[in-house]
Image (cartoon, rainbow, N blue to C red):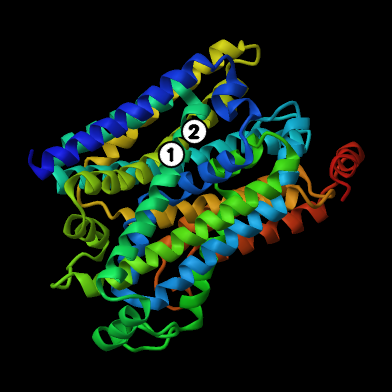
Amino acid sequence: MSGQWLIALTFVAYLAMILAIGVIAYLRTRDASDYFLGGRSLPPAVAALSAGASDMSGWLLLGLPGAAYASGLSSAWIALGLFSGIVLSWTTMARRLRIYTYELDDALTVPAYLHRRFNLGHPYLRTVCAFFILLFFLFYVASGLIAGGKLFETVFGWDYKWAVLIGAAAVISYTLFGGFLAVSWTDVIQGLLMSLALVAVPLVVINDEGGFAASWSRLHDKVPELMHWMQDNTGQALGIAAILSSLAWGLGYFGQPHIVARFMAVRRPEDVPTAATVAAVWSLFGFLGAMSVGLFGHLELAQTLPDGERVFMELVEALFHPLVAGILLAAILSAIMSTADSQLLVSSAALAEDIYHVWFGRKTSPEAMVKVGRWAVVALSLIAVAVAMDPESKVLDVVAYAWAGLGAAFGPATLISVFWSRMTGAGAIAGVIVGGLTVVVWRQLSGGIFDLYELLPGFVLSAAAIVIVSAATKCPAAVAARHRQLLGS
């Protein structure tokens, strides 16, 4: 049997497994809480791995190895920023958010939580939040479908557009039927598979080179320009703006709705420290593995790759038997799908819970809400597929933009809301609008200070807007008292 057929069979077996999980989860889905948050029943390890897998996407297997391959150790500043964001978001915000969202009439989404947190009598905050979620997530989902299309095109030689459609069908199927439970449990499998791939590939390369010390020494001899933390691959010193932009990626964790949803879905608030530990360990191994793939790839591959993001795929095909290669290449598919499904689910929740339910269906039954959510998955998927049909799209640029938009719009509002009892609904609205619009406007500018990653100014200005507007408006005494009663601050 040819190597390509073995790889294809591995992909088919993988897809069949996650679809089976979707069917099982479908049988356990009874209402909107089950569909959008899994009935808040996730064990800590499942919540942590699901958050990590839904966050990393193909970026961990393609983007970061590609950055390390092209830029060397200086690309580790991004990994450091992201690792810090993971640890801080789990340790500072997750437990409080789990308590608060459950007590506020089982709020299922970030917009619903913010609306009930401030006991607002109007739907404007939820609507503004849903707008930014849909705006940034449509491009985020499309970027995943683009990456999946390129993977199938590269590995199997399929036509790009058909590859996008096949990948989209797989994601839609188990998201549509199983909802949050299917997404979370498949994320566990996908997260473990990603970890296996990122550990196995560099270990094989290092072993072939005679061990870590010998490999590291050869890297210094072969690509000395890549072995400096404070220099880029041209030998130029990294500026403060470049380092801050890389570290600022970590701020995005506080506002990513598909990650925050895992905080809400943990089985008990007491499980959060365990989940935080699992998340930190998993991400640490993931970042170290991804960096190692990019760096040590220079030792294994005879020719310099014009596209560094192909380094993982090239190493897998060069080092492993086709059956093993199929499993490891499926890790790329799993990374893409684990993010696309989560983003698709959050987008459908925003459309169903925060727009349809608020504006058109105040007395809608739980069963009807699940149906609306599933139809929203289909509609949003079709739009994302249409966007993904352009093979020239720059996946990493789109991801960076969406990450910044969501992080700046929701990060400060969510973080401050669980700590400051005096924060007001008007402050939340101001923060969401200022953060989201800052990212949109900053992205259009270039040169000088505007080369700074737009997440950092967006986050800072959003936080400032929240504090200023909240200080200028009155927080109802009952809202402040409820906050202190639940969280003691």
**Which residue does the image show at 13% across and 72% down from the upper left?**
303
Judging depth in this view, the residue of 124 and 87 nearest the camera is 87
Q: Residue 419 at x, y = what percent? A: 79, 52
Q: Which residue is mark 2?
A: 185
SS assignment at label 2: helix
Determine contact: label 1, label 2, CB under 8 Å. Answer: yes
Q: Secondary structure at mark 1?
A: helix
Distance Cα–Cα, label 1 vs label 2: 7 Å
In the image, residue 355 sits, relative to residue 416, either above or below, namely: above
Residue 396 x, y percent position in the rendering: 34, 57
In the rendered structure, which amino acid carries the disc numbered 2? Trp
Towards the viewer: 370 or 337: 337
The answer to which of 180 and 331 lies nearer the viewer is 331
Would residue 310 be visible to someone looking at this image?
yes
Q: Which mark is residue 189?
A: 1
480 is higher (above) or lower (below) than 172: below
Q: Amino acid at mark 1?
A: Ile
Instruction: Tell me if residue 246 comes above or below residue 216 in the rendering.
Output: above
